[in-house]
Image (cartoon, grey):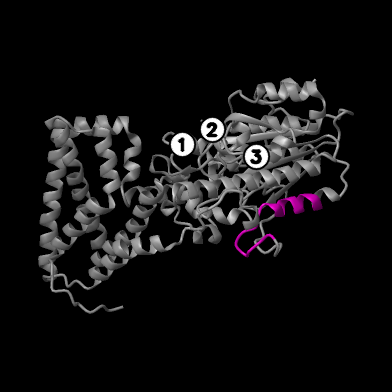
Amino acid sequence: MKFPRSLNFTPTSAQFILIASLFITAIFNAPFLSAVYEVVAPVTLKEWTFFVSVPLLLTFLNVILLSLFGALFLPRLTVAITFVVSALLLYGTLTYGVIFDKSMMQNVMETNSGEAFSYLNSTLFVFFALLGLIPVFAIFNLEINGQLKARIKHLLVLNLISLVGIAVIATFLFKSYAAVGRNNKDLTRYIIPYAFYNSGYKYLRDTYFYPPLPYKVLDKRPFVKEDADVYPSTTVLVVGETARADKFSSNGYTRNTTPNIQKAGAISFSKVTSCGTATAVSVPCMFSRLTRENYDSRTADSQDNVLDIIHRAGVDVTWIDNNSSCKGVCKRVETIDFNPSRDPRLCDGDYCYDEVLVDLLRETLSTPSKEPRVIVLHMIGSHGPTYYRRYPEELAKYVPDCPRSDIQNCEEAELTNTYDNTIAYTDYVLGQIIEMLSAIPNSSMLYLSDHGESLGEKGLYLHGFPYNLAPAEQTHVPMVYWASRFSQPQYSDCVNSLSSHPYSQDNLFDTLLGLSHVQSSTYHPTQDILRQCES
């Protein structure tokens, strides 16, 4: 497509690359430079020298990379693509505090269309137009001056200057860079767009180019302990979405967001941490035998998870989804996939309210089974940024709420109301599940959210921050347990005595084996939260 060369400015190829490099450094990498400034906190001349060298070094690197890829392809196209990608990345970083590491890339690649469209709003369009579309239009309206030989000569000189600049900085400031880099390894994740490209490469490499690992069966002969008092059992595991522990009144929140689970006598565990800060990590991790410290997605995907072991033992296992997917956890058990048009009363074509899970659970339980059951319900819960679409309007307990996706523009009180409404609705759904199970002997319900959510604290929104940097709002998750055995005061008192102990999603594997009465060589009794209450 030809654009009219209507701009009077006609730079040389070297000037074009230099201007683009400076723009990428000064505008798109403002968050990176700000993060460096916070780390260095320059006071002395040496510290200021180091800090000033950082944008210079980044500009030199931009020059070399843009020149290289511009030579391989086309300079305008290379810069235009860089600007488009960088504008979107900068929006995510400034608006939500997002860092595009490999984990975040996995979230992006596994996001369905409904989730993706929920991030579209007028603020994004304006931002993208100003820093993406308008610069790209200007780029394609520039006439780059000079003949091919002159262009190559100018670029070679510019790259030589850049290489000399890098060499000078490395010679005099290497120790400073080594010290800052060694103590702040996550700083490079802020560099736009190269951190994104690096993470994308790693995700594609690990997902599509590594040969699959041979599948590992962790236990060939698990079995159900046929205890006359507990056989058959019905266990409902509810996997929550984006719920924060500190927003549950059962954990001490000042608002009464969880009256139903409290009225039902369910017990909240107040000190539970997640395996990750995003569904794509936390869900497969919590069902895996691997721990948070040694979790690897390729390894987890190529071996049994706890549902596989329970199913192999003869337990009837069903996964019912009201979210994007089970992230591979349910691929070897019976699955009822998410259908956004399942019920016109509860679905709008993009999402369904979580009450649809109650109806599907009722249908599943209406079919008699002689075998013990484990039914997993995967909620949409408090998934953002469109929190207002997670609960029916008539059940909005806290008003006014904020019915928009650019949540950074919500009033703080309205955003809090909106998110708290999602928690109150989750409580409403859990209350219905408990009521249904209360009529079934030997039944239990365990609710555990996949990760938490930032609502503007420390300038962060949503989730997916690197775990070692993530705030507690993204890693402190609610866990709620109810059992028909709570009619026995000795059992309920024992469970209640454990509710303030620290646990993590690493405990789910063994706790679920215990709840389903499965004997397995993979079982670690010390990791089963409820084991000491069995008698």
Q: Amino acid at mark 1?
A: Tyr
Q: Which residue is denoted by mark 3 in the rendering? A: 258
Q: Is residue 329 visible?
A: no
**SS at badge 1:** loop
How far separated are the C-alphas under marks 2 and 3?
Answer: 29 Å
Q: Which residues are magenta?
A: 346-363
The disc at residue 467 is 1
How far separated are the C-alphas under marks 3 and 1?
Answer: 28 Å
Mark 2 burial class by Cα count in 10 Å: few <14, some 14-19, many 20+: some
Question: Contact, CB < 8 Å: mark 1 with mark 2?
Answer: yes
**Residue mark closest to the camera, 3 vs 1:** 3
At horizontal 59% and vertical 42% (from top left) the residue drawn is 283
* 413 vs 526: above or below: below
Question: Contact, CB < 8 Å: mark 2 with mark 3?
Answer: no
Direction from residue 117 to residue 508 in the image, left or right: right
Q: Which residue is denoted by mark 2 in the rendering? A: 292
